[in-house]
Amino acid sequence: MRLVQVAQHADDLDRAAAFYSTLLDTEPTAVFDPPGLLFFDLDGIRLLLDRNAPSALHYLSVADVAAALERIGDRAEVVAPPHKIFTHGDDTLGPAGYDEWQAFVRDSEGNTVGLVSFRPVS
């Protein structure tokens, strides 16, 4: 079994498309309006932005949390700045020998989104 799709609430699909296109550095894969559906491909998992979906907290893997925040600039409110949350001693939850960094932003639709990156332990 594998995850196929994650849905996230979006009131304004154009605004959400602009935000997520910038954050993910890619264009949407599909838009169906009506009924109000916007899709992005996250390495084989669909991110669905939907007017009728509830808000969800999802974590997105980015190459560098700080660089992702710079890329989205003032398009998002930073809820929690980049911070190291854990050093992985084994591969149980992440790559062994790496620090896990996270930041949290509020997207264009008011949802909180976690950004995650890994850096070799220094």
Image: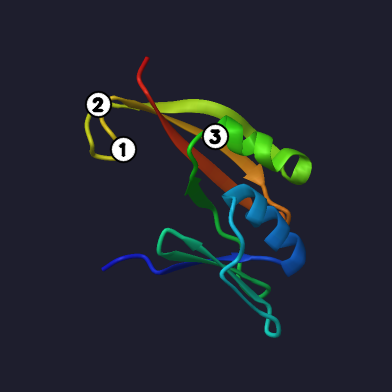
- Crowding at dot 1, Cα within 10 Å, few <14 / some 14-19 / many 20+, comes out as some
- Crowding at dot 3, Cα within 10 Å, few <14 / some 14-19 / many 20+, comes out as many
- Crowding at dot 2, Cα within 10 Å, few <14 / some 14-19 / many 20+, comes out as some
Residue at x 73% of width, y 54% of height: 108
Residue at x 60% of width, y 66% of height: 28
Mark linked to residue 94 = 1
Q: Which corner quadrant of the image does residue 26 belong to?
A: bottom right
Does 91 appear above or below 49? above
Q: Secondary structure at mark 2?
A: loop
The numbered mark, 3 or 1, whose residue comes first in the sequence reads 3
The span from disc 1 to disc 2 (Cα, nearest Å) is 9 Å
Q: Secondary structure at mark 1?
A: loop
Q: Which quarter of the rendered picture does the C terminus lie within? A: top left
Residue 12 in view here: no
Give how far across and how far down residue 47 sits, in percent. 52, 64
Of the residues tagged 3 and 1, which is closer to the observer? 3
Q: Secondary structure at mark 3?
A: helix
Residue at x 24% of width, y 39% of height: 92
Q: Which quarter of the rendered picture does the N terminus lie within? A: bottom left
Does 12 appear above or below 32? above
- Disc 2 designates what residue? 89
- Disc 3 designates what residue? 65
Give how far across and how far down residue 52 sits, in percent. 65, 75
Do the CB atoms of the residues marked 1 and 2 lie less than 8 Å apart? no
Does 74 appear above or below 10? above
Q: In the image, what residue type sits under mark 2?
A: Gly
Give how far across and how far down residue 81 sits, in percent. 62, 30
In the image: residue 69, left or right of residue 92: right
The numbered mark, 3 or 2, whose residue comes first in the sequence reads 3
The span from disc 3 to disc 2 (Cα, nearest Å) is 21 Å
Give how far across and how far down residue 77 sits, in percent. 73, 41
Q: Which corner quadrant of the image does residue 82 belong to?
A: top right
